[in-house]
Image (cartoon, rainbow, N blue to C red):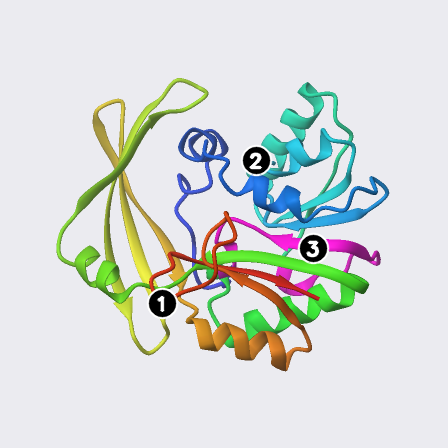
Amino acid sequence: MDSTYTVGDLIYDANIYDGMNTHMDDLPFYKRWLPKNKDTRILELCCGTGRLTLPIASEGYDITGVDYTPSMLQKAKTKATEAGLDIKFVEADMRFLQLRESFDIIFIPFNSIHHLYTNEDLKTTLQGVKNHLKKGGTFLFDCYNPNIHIIVDGEKELLPITQFTTPDGRDVSIQQIMKYEKKSQINRIEWHYFINGTFDSKQHLDMRMYFPQELDAWLKWMGFDIIHKFGNFEEAPFEDDSDKQIFVCR
C-alpha cells in the first residue's frame, strides 16, 4: 500500500489467490461475532475476492467489502453475481476511508493489517475505523504473533511453502525466502513462482510485524477498548506461544 512499493503481479492475481486460499478456518470466528439481527451493517476491509464476504452475505447480512486491488474486486463481483448475491464492493485504500456511512461491525481479516508498513499507516487506518464505526460498534481483526525463530529460519534457504491448481487450470508451486529488517519491523518476503512446472518469476510480499504489546498500546491510544484478545480462531486465550493475535474491540 506504500506508493513506493509494488506488490508482484502474481500475488494478487485473483485466480492464483483463490487457488491458494481455500481454507475457511477464520469464517466461523467472524460469524460468531455477528448479531442475530440481520439489519446489522457490516464493513469488511481488505475483502479480496470475497472469501468471507460472500458466505456472510449469503446468510442475509448487509455487508460492504472494501479492497485496494481492482482485479480482486472484479473477481469478488463476478462470484457474487454468480451466487445471486447483491453485495456492495468499493475500491478504496483502508488508510483513507471516506465512505460517508457508519457500520455496526468492522473487521479486517486474514492478516491484512501487516500490509500497513508505517506507524502513520496504522494510525490513519484505526482512525478511519473509528470514524465509520457506530457508537457501541465492534471492531475485529486478526494478525500474526511474530515468531522470531520462524523468521530467522526463513532467512536461511529457499523452501517450498505450497502447491495448488488455480480455478483457471494452472498448476502452481511457490518457494519462499525472507529477510527481516529490524529497524522497520518489515519482513521482506520473496516468493518464487513455478507455473505448470516451469519457473515463472520472483514476487515480493512485504509484511510489517506488529508485536503484542505494541498493538495493545496502539489500540488503547486510539480510543478502542480491547474486549477480548485471543490466540486462535477457537478463542483460546492469547499466550506466549500463540500463533495469532485476534482482537475484539469496541
Front: mark 1 or 3: 1
Q: Which residue lies under the disc numbered 3?
A: 106
Quadrant housing residue 36? top right
Q: Left or right: 160 with respect to 60? A: left
* Amino acid type shown at disc 2: Arg
Q: Earlier in the sequence, mark 2 or mark 3?
A: 2
Q: Left or right: 204 with respect to 179? A: right
Whether residue 86 is in magenta: the answer is: no
Quadrant housing residue 169? top left
Position of residue 91 relative to residue 120, above or below, is: above
Check the image and name the residue furthest to the front: 236
Q: Which residues are magenta?
A: 94-113
Alpha-carbon distance for marks 1 and 3?
A: 27 Å
Front: mark 2 or 1: 1
Label 3 Cα crowd, 10 Å radius (few <14 / some 14-19 / many 20+): many
Question: In x, y percent, where is residue 46?
Answer: 59, 49
Helix, strand or loop under label 1: loop
Q: Left or right: 116 with respect to 169? A: right
Question: In x, y percent, where is residue 51?
Answer: 57, 35
Relative depth, front residue between 37 and 118: 37
* Residue at (82% x, 39% y) in the render: 38
Q: Which residue lies under the disc numbered 1?
A: 240
Position of residue 45 relative to residue 98, above or below, is: above
* Residue at (50% x, 48% y) in the render: 233
